[in-house]
């Protein structure tokens, strides 16, 4: 049977080796006689799983000691509320950069708690670029500045890290749900980073939060206990039962990333995979990607066919050829190929070969 390549935006492809190891350990984790799903989250077996995950992640992303790592639930969407609830710290407003649907949603949710200043937006250009920092209208009294490093639906990425001025103490907050660990990152530039796991880290059900420790501990009055970062810090993500199986699989993904050579090696591979697909799209007038070149995502590549009447044929034939989940987001249509860390190079090569043949035949 030919292999299947899964281009889903999320939940998304996981490394085959990880799934195989999980399969091998499904009934009996390392000779303890239990499945990870059956373990007490406070038992020594699971404690070793979560501690190993934290250590591996800290090592892979060079996370400094004064940053806490939290393993929470509620998806990245819960962070849209949890960020203002915790980071306003007596202030009345926050800045947001809006580059697509996810950052729009984050800004909208924050409006329930504070005055939101849209410091920059590419909405008038249908979210096809990431505004340069010298155009941002930053409010110096903002409690924090939020942006989305990679817009999963529109395929717009910040391929640079904002540099808030030396004498500004506005913490930078980033939703990295769809590109975290796709390249090296400098955590010390951020106050808080969050990411739903189901794009580039592991299965759904887990959301990762990396927070500079001085930012927690001053949540809005009335903040639910489970929405208070300090509670999770004080309880090492065990205030309530954490999503144990998702944590276990994410731990296996960290081991896999280390085996690949770490984030610098993964980045080179991601650059290569994305370049193969963008080259075809740009060199063939049958396909089109609307995003400005410098701001294109390596993770989520949206594209349209010159003739939209062929969309259904394209999707049927890709699927018949083992290239699945290429349909674009329902709000934008067209196609989207997600090339997360776990997408092998061969998958992209197969897709590009198919697309070339399809264009030759129908162009
Ligand atoms: C998927 C996604 C979200 C929402 O994640 P949920 O886990 O469904 O809440 C938020 N931000 C970005 C960038 C995403 O890709």
Image (cartoon, rainbow, N blue to C red):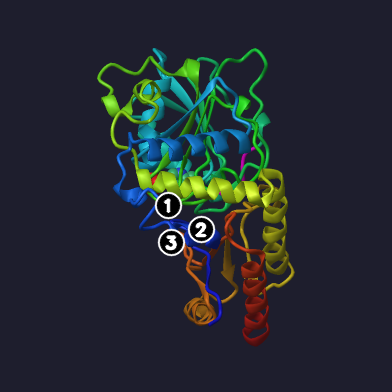
Judge the density around disc 2: few (<14), some (14-19), many (≥20) Cα neighbours within 10 Å: many
- Are the residues flagged by discs 3 and 2 in contact, CB closer than 8 Å? no
Q: Residue at x 34, y 52 (%)?
A: 35
Give the mark nearest the N terminus, 1 or 3.
3
In the image, is the residue at mark 1 within 8 Å of ligand 1 by its beta carbon?
no
- Discs 3/2, front: 3
Give the mark nearest the N terminus, 1 or 2.
2
* Rendered location of residue 273, percent (x, y): 68, 60
| Residue 167: quadrant of the picture | top right
- Are the residues flagged by discs 1 and 2 in contact, CB closer than 8 Å? yes
Q: From where the camera sits, is residue 142 visible? A: no
Q: Which residue is mark 2?
A: 14
In the image, is the residue at mark 2 within 8 Å of ligand 1 by its beta carbon?
no
* Rendered location of residue 175, percent (x, y): 50, 38
Residue 161 vs residue 112: left or right? right
Q: Residue at x 49, y 51 (%)?
A: 199
Judge the density around disc 3: few (<14), some (14-19), many (≥20) Cα neighbours within 10 Å: few
Q: Which mark is residue 203?
A: 1
Disc 2 secondary structure class: loop
* Rendered location of residue 119, percent (x, y): 54, 29
Nearer to us in this view, 169 or 260: 260
Q: Is residue 353 magenta?
A: no
User: How far apart are the two marked residues, 1 and 3, measured between alpha carbons?
Assistant: 15 Å
Q: Which residue is mark 3?
A: 23
Q: From where the camera sits, is residue 111 visible? A: yes
Q: Residue at x 62, y 82 (%)?
A: 358
Point out the residue furthest to the bottom here: 361
């Amino acid at each position: 049977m030919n292999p299947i390549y899964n281009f889903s935006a999320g939940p998304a492809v996981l490394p085959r080796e990880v799934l195989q190891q999980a399969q091998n350990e499904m009934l009996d984790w390392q000779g303890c006689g239990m499945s990870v799903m059956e373990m007490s989250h406070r038992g020594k077996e699971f404690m070793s799983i979560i501690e190993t995950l934290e250590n591996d992640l800290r090592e892979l992303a060079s996370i400094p000691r004064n940053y806490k790592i939290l393993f929470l639930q509620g998806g990245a969407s819960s962070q849209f509320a949890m960020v203002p609830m915790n980071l306003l710290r007596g202030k009345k407003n926050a800045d947001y950069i809006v580059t697509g649907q996810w950052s729009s949603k984050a800004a909208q949710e924050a409006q329930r708690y504070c005055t939101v200043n849209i410091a920059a937006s590419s909405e008038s250009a249908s979210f096809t670029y990431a505004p340069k920092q010298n155009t941002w209208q930053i409010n110096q009294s903002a409690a924090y500045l939020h942006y989305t490093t990679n817009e999963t639906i529109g395929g717009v990425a910040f391929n640079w890290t904002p540099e808030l001025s030396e004498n500004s103490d506005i913490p930078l907050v980033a939703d990295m749900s769809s590109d975290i660990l796709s390249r090296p990152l400098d955590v010390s530039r951020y106050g808080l980073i969050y990411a739903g796991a189901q794009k580039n880290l592991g299965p759904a059900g887990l959301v990762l939060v990396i927070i500079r420790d001085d930012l927690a501990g001053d949540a809005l009055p009335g903040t639910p206990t489970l929405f208070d970062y300090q509670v999770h810090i004080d309880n090492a993500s065990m205030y309530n039962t954490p999503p144990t199986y998702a944590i276990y699989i994410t731990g296996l993904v960290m081991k896999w990333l280390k085996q690949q050579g770490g984030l610098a090696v993964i980045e080179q591979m991601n650059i290569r995979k994305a370049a193969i697909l963008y080259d075809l799209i740009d060199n063939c007038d049958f396909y089109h990607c609307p995003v400005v070149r410098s701001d294109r995502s390596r993770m989520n590549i949206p594209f349209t066919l010159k003739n939209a009447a062929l969309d259904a044929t394209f999707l049927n034939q890709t699927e018949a050829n083992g290239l699945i989940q290429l349909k674009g987001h329902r709000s934008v249509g067209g196609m989207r190929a997600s090339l997360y860390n776990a997408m092998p190079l061969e998958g992209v090569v197969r897709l590009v070969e198919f697309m070339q043949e399809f264009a030759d035949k129908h162009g």
